[in-house]
Image: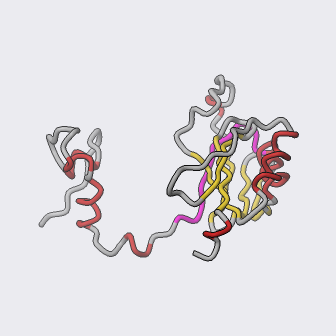
Amino acid sequence: MRSRRPHAGQSWANIASPGANRNQPAYRDWRCVIAAQFTGVFMSIAMTRLILYVRDVTALKSFYQTFFGFDVLEEIEGEWVVLKAGPVELALHLVGRPYRYRPLAPGSGNAKLVFSMPSGMAALREQLLRAGVQMSAPKRYDGFAYTMCDGQDPEGNVFQLSQSDPDNLGA
């Protein structure tokens, strides 16, 4: 079978199920088709870094160092910084000039950074609140062995603190 790749203006979804109705499972599950074409590749891929494009690298670096204790791995002052955030690095990259002065819409991003901890979530949440960080109330869901709460960093990026229930720590 010849490998098909999208051309300009065409998405992987169109390649996986051309002409499909968006409500049909074939359209929704196009990733399965892609995975089948490249069997084995996904087993060796690991996410190692998340890059946020930000307006103030220095302010966000300070925020994540102060409240989360992340160490700096590399830095170009005011333009780029990589923080060690457990097994994944959090990189802060100065957004391009045309985007620096557009109004911010807090919480409008489509990503949420999740920071897991074995204990101390309530104390960290209180510390963040005292510092003026917008934080939601802690929440739990039936069948989910975690307590969590959401917050926003100084540029409105949503993050979540997640703490495993004591009974679930060894699981």
Say which residue appears at 81% left-offset and 44% top-offset.
Answer: 128
* Residue 155 percent coordinates (x, y): 71, 36
Q: Quadrant of residue 69?
A: bottom right
Left-right relation of 126 to 21:
right
Q: How many marks?
A: 0
Describe residue 161's horizontal placement relative to residue 37 as left or right. right
Task: Classify residue 30 as left or right of residue 62.
Answer: left
Q: Position of residue 89 (x, y in %)?
A: 65, 62
Residue shown at 65% from the left, 30% from the top: 106
Q: Quadrant of the N terminus?
A: bottom left
Q: Quadrant of residue 135?
A: top right
Could you tell me residue 47's position as x and y percent? 53, 64
Colour scheme of the rendered structure: secondary structure
Which residue in the rendered view is the most extreme toward the left? 1
Q: Position of residue 45 (x, y in %)?
A: 45, 70
Q: Is residue 148 above or below residue 156?
A: below
What residue is drawn where x is 59% and y is 55%? 50
Verify whether residue 34 appears in magenta. no
Question: Who is closer to the viewer here, 33 or 162?
Answer: 162
- Quarter of the picture containing the C terminus is bottom right
Residue at coordinates 75% horizontally, 55% vertically from top-left?
Answer: 121
Query: Where is 86 relative to 112, above or below?
Result: below
In the image, the segment drawn in magenta is 47-57
Furthest toward the top, the residue is: 103
